[in-house]
Image: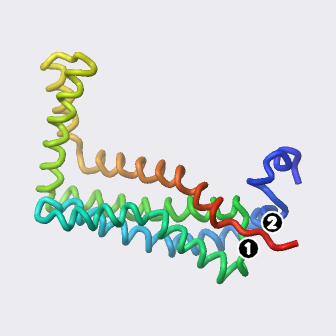
Amino acid sequence: MLPFSKKFSIFATKSDMKMINPINIRQARAFARQDGLILATAWIISFICAMQAYRSSFLGLISSVLQIATPFIVGYTLKKFRDKILDGNISFRRAFFYCMETFFYASIILTIFQFAYLKWGDTTGFMAQISEYSKIAAQMYRDTYHMSPAQVKQVMEAFTMMTPLAWASAFLMTELVGGLIISPIIALIMKRQPEK
C-alpha cells in the first residue's frame, strides 16, 4: 500500500486495493447505472410533483418526501449491492465510488428530463414559483446589498430570462454537489470489512 494510503486508512484499506481492478470498477459502474435509474425515477416523480404543486399542496408534499428519501434510496441500493454481490463486505472507498456513480447517472437522466420538461412541458407552476422567489430576492437585494431599484430590476430580468438549458445545467450542478456531500456519509455508514 502506498504511504499516503496508510495515513488515511479509513479511505484505503487492503480491500480497497481490489477495487483498483478494472473488472471491479466496471462491476460497480454497471450496478450504479441500474440503481441510478431507480434514483432518477424517484427524482423525476419529485420534479413533476414540484412543477404541479400549484394544483395541489399534496403534490408538493410528495415532492418533498421523495427529496428527503434520496439518501435512504441510495443507502438501500448500496446495501443490496454490498450484500448480494460483494458477500456483505465493502470498503469506504468502494462504497463512496458506487454512491457517486449512482448520483452521477441519476443526475444526467434527471437533467435531460428537466430540460425537455422546461422546454416543452407545463411550466405554469415553475414560473409562478420563480415569480414569487423573484419578489423575495428583490427585497433581499435591496435590504442586504443596498442595490438601487434599477439594479435589482436588471438582476431579476436576467434571472427570469434563463433558458431551459441554463436551468437544467444549474439543477445538474446542485444534484452533483448534493451527491458529493451525501455520498461519504452513506459510504461511511454502509461500509463493512471482513471479520479478522
| Residue 27 in picture, x, y percent from top left | 65, 74
Asked which secondary structure carries label 1, the reply is loop
| Residue at x 61% of width, y 65% of height | 98
Mark 2, residues whose alpha carbon is within 10 Å: few (<14), some, or many (≥20)? some
Q: Amino acid at mark 1?
A: Asn
| Residue 150 in picture, x, y percent from top left | 13, 19
Mark 1, residues whose alpha carbon is within 10 Å: few (<14), some, or many (≥20)? some
In the image, taking residue 155 as reference, residue 91 lies left or right, namely right
Q: Amino acid at mark 2?
A: Ser
Rendered image: mark on residue 89: 1
Q: Quadrant of the C terminus?
A: bottom right
Asked which secondary structure carries label 2, the reply is helix
Is there a contact, CB below 8 Å, between mark 1 and mark 2? Answer: yes
The image quadrant that residue 145 belongs to is: top left
In the image, taking residue 185 as reference, residue 122 lies left or right, namely left
Q: Quadrant of the N terminus?
A: bottom right
Q: Nearer the viewer, residue 115 or 134?
A: 134
| Residue at x 14% of width, y 26% of height | 153
Is 119 situated above or below 33? above
Q: Nearer the viewer, residue 188 or 179?
A: 188
| Residue 172 in picture, x, y percent from top left | 40, 52
Q: Alpha carbon of mark 1 to alpha carbon of mark 2: how far? A: 9 Å
- Mark before the other along the chain sequence, 1 or 2: 2
| Residue at x 16% of width, y 16% of height | 148
Is 3 situated above or below 154? below
Look at mark 2 in the image and give the residue it sits on.
15
Q: Which of label 1 and label 2 is nearer to you?
A: 1
The image quadrant that residue 62 belongs to is: bottom left
